[in-house]
């Protein structure tokens, strides 16, 4: 019997192994790296494969167990090998420039991304780009100048017309157009960014796609002496110089804006007064905010006769975009002195209903800030340095303080029991500015912190989890 024990143990180990693992090892196909926000069902839909086939190919039994960075074999994509990389389209990218830069055949690109028309190429959209074995990595961007032939440009770039024609799918030396973005082997010489006019060296938008209630960070590098302006959706952009030589604009996106495609235009005014403009559509996605919050309040505090003038007053206070940036690094919680910065009694963006106590009056609205729990008298501290531009009583918001942090960024603190600063006072990060209270339209004492970016209330939690710009 002792001699049979090792054989029995081996047999038990063999039959205890999941059968799907052996099957998964036999499946071949390209590798997709899971991105944040992906689900197995969304990946299956993206590549037009069944969920069951995707799970079987990867030995997955629980479709909810998926981690960002995980590698998945995608079955059914005959003739495609290697890694399927995710590229997020940024400002200035175009369908043609991406095809040229990556050297991916158009039919393969269309198959992987279900592209029907190049007009579907929006900023913030994720595109799948396969890594091609032996493909040339083209990062050097060049563009024919006005009146310059492809031959002249090739000489200027120490290249030849055959190389440029080959890599950019041109018919010949006569096929280059002024302003067209071409790619060649070598390092990017920063003369132009894909698709942008000559005044722009580069232009990028951070944290794509932009969400409802998000803060868009637009960074642009230009030729010397260029002045920048622009419009995102329907808001004028204000650009300010940064230490790395770029110009930066911060712009909030309204939390109730319908998800969809909206315009972004950049205007570059050259020293001679001429203007070069570039416009592209940008994807705005849902912020996935909570719904169903209902609050009973004094009916007079949801009367538009009261609420609208106060809202207009806040908009006027937070409209100026101060050229000086007063803050450095990341914002901190204004409730850090008394509460865990993850303890929120109500989050930004939550869709809520106000009901007038003792009446049938109901108002649908949304939560414009971040609420921290806490009782009367607890210390409120400045989340970042700035200058106090308002300190006084309001009807709906109670005792209120507004701090200008510069570059169009403002903090508002509502419902205080005491205000401990005055207009014109310079405050430092973590300095006490007031005390928690229950003044104004509230159901109990708490701190409501609101953050405005170029005239729009944004999610303050974003500013607690990363530094801007």
Image: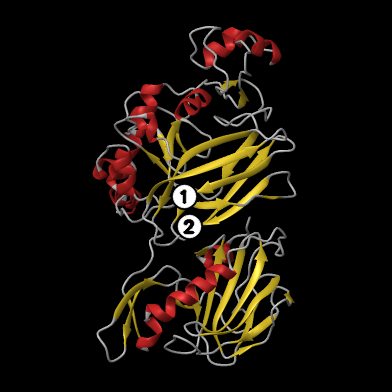
Camera sees residue 362: yes
Q: Secondary structure at mark 2?
A: loop
Camera sees residue 88: no
Q: Tell me the quadrant of the picture where the N terminus can be found.
A: bottom left
* Picture colour scheme: secondary structure
Q: Nearer the viewer, residue 215 or 358?
A: 358
Residue 101 rendering spot, x and y as whole percentages: 53, 25
Tell me what residue is drawn at x 57 percent, y 7 percent. Answer: 162
Tell me what residue is drawn at x 63 percent, y 13 percent. Answer: 148
Tell me the tag on residue 335.
none
Residue 246 rendering spot, x and y as whole percentages: 69, 44
Question: Which of the two discs, 1 and 2, sits closer to the camera?
Answer: 1
Tell me what residue is drawn at x 73 percent, y 46 percent. Answer: 244
Q: Nearer the viewer, residue 193 or 145?
A: 145
Q: Secondary structure at mark 1?
A: loop
Give the left or right position of residue 15, taking residue 430 as reference. left
Q: Tell me the quadrant of the picture where the C terminus can be found.
A: bottom right
Q: Which residue is mark 2?
A: 253
Q: Which residue is mark 1?
A: 233
N-terminal label among 1 and 2 = 1
């Amino acid at each position: 019997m002792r001699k049979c024990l090792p054989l029995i143990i081996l047999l038990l180990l063999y039959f205890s192994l999941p059968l799907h693992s052996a099957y998964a090892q036999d499946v071949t196909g390209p590798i997709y790296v899971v991105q944040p926000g992906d689900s197995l069902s969304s990946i299956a839909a993206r590549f037009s494969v069944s969920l069951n086939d995707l799970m079987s190919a990867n030995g997955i039994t629980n479709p909810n167990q998926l981690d960002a960075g995980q590698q998945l074999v995608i079955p059914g994509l005959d003739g495609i090998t290697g890694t399927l990389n995710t590229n997020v389209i940024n400002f200035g990218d175009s369908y043609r420039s991406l095809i040229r830069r990556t050297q991916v055949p158009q039919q393969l690109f269309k198959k992987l991304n279900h592209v029907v028309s190049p007009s579907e190429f929006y900023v913030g959209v994720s595109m799948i780009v396969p890594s091609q074995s032996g493909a040339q990595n083209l990062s050097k961007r060049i563009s024919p100048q006005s009146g310059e032939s492809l031959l002249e440009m090739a000489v200027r770039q120490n290249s030849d017309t055959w190389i440029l024609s080959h890599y950019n799918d041109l018919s010949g030396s006569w096929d280059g157009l002024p302003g067209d973005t071409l790619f060649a082997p070598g390092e990017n010489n920063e003369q132009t960014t894909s698709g942008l006019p000559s005044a722009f060296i580069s232009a990028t938008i951070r944290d794509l796609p932009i969400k409802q209630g998000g803060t868009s960070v637009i960074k642009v590098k230009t030729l010397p002496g260029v002045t920048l302006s622009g419009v995102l959706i329907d808001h004028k952009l204000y650009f300010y110089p940064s230490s790395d030589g770029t110009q930066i604009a911060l712009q909030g996106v309204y939390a109730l804006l319908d998800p969809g495609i909206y315009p972004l235009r950049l205007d570059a005014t050259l020293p001679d007064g001429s203007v070069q403009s570039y416009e592209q559509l940008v994807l705005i996605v849902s912020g996935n905010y909570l719904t169903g919050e209902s609050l009973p309040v004094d009916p007079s505090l949801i009367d538009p006769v009261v609420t609208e003038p106060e809202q207009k007053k806040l908009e006027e206070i937070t409209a100026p975009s101060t050229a000086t940036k007063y803050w450095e690094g990341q914002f901190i919680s204004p409730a850090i002195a008394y509460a865990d910065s993850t303890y929120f009694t109500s989050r930004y963006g939550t869709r809520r209903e106000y009901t007038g106590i003792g009446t049938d009056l109901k108002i649908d609205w949304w939560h414009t800030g971040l609420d921290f729990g806490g009782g009367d008298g607890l210390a409120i501290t400045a989340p970042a340095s700035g200058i106090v531009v308002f300190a006084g009583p309001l009807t709906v918001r109670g005792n209120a303080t507004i701090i200008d942090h510069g570059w169009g960024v403002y903090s508002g603190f509502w419902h205080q029991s005491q205000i401990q600063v005055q207009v014109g006072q310079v405050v430092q990060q973590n300095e006490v500015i007031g005390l928690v209270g229950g003044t104004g339209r509230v159901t109990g004492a708490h701190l409501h912190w609101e953050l405005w970016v170029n005239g729009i209330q944004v999610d303050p939690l974003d500013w607690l989890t990363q530094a801007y710009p």
